[in-house]
Image (cartoon, rainbow, N blue to C red):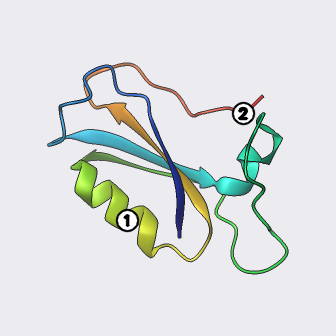
Amino acid sequence: MLMNVIDLREKPYRWKSVVAVIESAAKNNAAEDADPVDTSSGVEIDYAEREDVTVREAVLWAEQLQGKVTLYLYDKDGEWKAPTTS
């Protein structure tokens, strides 16, 4: 289940081919002003990624997952790394 989207693309109007990364939304619980995500029940997805997908495909993929996730979007042609929450 998609809980949040973090768009880290430098070219925000490019939608045909992006990199989509998902992480457990519970990882964001430590972020300032975050809405807490309950992890006591259900599936928790640690990390997954897909390259060369449309923004729509990325959102649909994240939404159909069993666990509560945050979707991160990156430019396909840019440098990117796994998100970290401090």
Q: Secondary structure at mark 1?
A: helix
| Up-down relation of residue 61 to residue 30 (above or below) | below
Name the residue that disc number 2 marks: 85
- On the rendered image, what quadrant is the C terminus found in? top right
Residue 14, numbered label: none
**What residue appears at the point 27 percent right and 39 percent down from the top-left corner?**
18
Percent position of residue 74, x then y: 37, 32
Query: Which residue is more in the foreground, 4 or 73?
Result: 4
Type of amino acid under label 1: Trp
Percent position of residue 1, x then y: 53, 70
Instruction: Classify residue 63 as left or right of residue 12.
Output: right
Name the residue that disc number 1 marks: 61
**What residue appears at the point 59 percent right and 33 percent down from the top-left corner?**
83
Query: Which residue is more in the foreground, 9 or 48?
Result: 9
Answer few, some or many: residues within 10 Å of disc 2's Cα (few below 14, many 20 plus, some between 14 and 19): few
Q: How many marks?
A: 2
**What residue appears at the point 43 percent right and 69 percent down from the top-left corner?**
63
Q: Which residue, as the protein is rendered here, is positioned at the far left?
A: 16
Answer few, some or many: residues within 10 Å of disc 1's Cα (few below 14, many 20 plus, some between 14 and 19): some
